[in-house]
Amino acid sequence: MKIVVAYKWAASPQDASVGADGSVDWSRAKASFGEYDAVAAELGRRLADESGAEVVGVSVGGPAVVSSLAKKGALSRGLDRAVLVGDAPEDARGPLATGRALAALVSRIGDVDVVLAGDASVDVAAGVVPSVLAGELGWPVVTQVTSVTPQDGALRVTRSLPSGSETLLVPAPAVLCAAADAVVARVPGMKDILQAGKKPSENVAYADLGLEAAPSPAQASASPVHTAARRGVVIDGSDPASAATELVGALRSAGTL
């Protein structure tokens, strides 16, 4: 059995700052292994330990993806090796293009039984990459997965529903999208990080994936945040009843009430 974990090395929005004009400054946001991807990696590691399988990490992005820091950060999560694309063009890093590239990587690895992915990427959070990946491969996809075990050449999958949960027997190969709270992901220790530096990784050129240029998706236009000027109305609060009446009148005249 061969397990693939698709992940994204991305900057956390928690480290970004938003200016008064609505612009987002990412300059101080540090990239890391996404918290949702960590859940998928933990599910993959547990499945591998149960079945004796290999866990391969795959990721597509810019040069940061193949940096020593990124490789150790990913491989310390329980992955056995990694196959990475670190030269994807800027216009090929969106959810649709990434899903297609990841599918090409999975096909390149070969004999994959299951692909595990996080609920969403930590930065864009589009939540469509696993479905695009599955569509490109022609495999079934199951979302909100909380557990997975091998059973008679198939995958016994439990997924979360608003009303409870359900258990499915999914034919392999398949793409499984882990629920954000499926398991508690391990926190790599120093030993894990040191061992990660010795694990193999392969860098694949984006051009070698053989992908044809896809139509550019529609782009949403951005507009500056509208901030209304403050009126600076001061209400004398010495007489509470009169102040309350004046406040209500001011709010009505402003169209708030």
Image: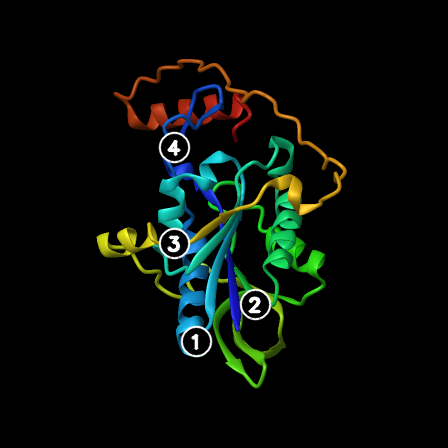
- At 50% from the left and 19% from the top, the residue drawn is 227
**Disc 3 versus disc 4: distance between alpha carbons?**
22 Å
- At 28% from the left and 23% from the top, the residue drawn is 239
Element at badge 4?
A: loop
Left or right: where 135 falls relative to 44: right
**Disc 2 versus disc 1: distance between alpha carbons?**
14 Å
First of labels 2, 1 by sequence position: 1
Given residues 240 and 109, the one toward you in this image is: 109
First of labels 3, 1 by sequence position: 1
First of labels 3, 4 by sequence position: 4
Q: Nearer the viewer, mark 1 or mark 4?
A: 1
Given residues 81 and 78, the one toward you in this image is: 81
- Mark 1, other Cα within 10 Å: few <14 / some 14–19 / many ≥20: few
Q: Name the residue beneath numbered marker 4.
A: 29
Q: Residue 3: image x %, image y %?
A: 51, 66
- Mark 2, other Cα within 10 Å: few <14 / some 14–19 / many ≥20: many
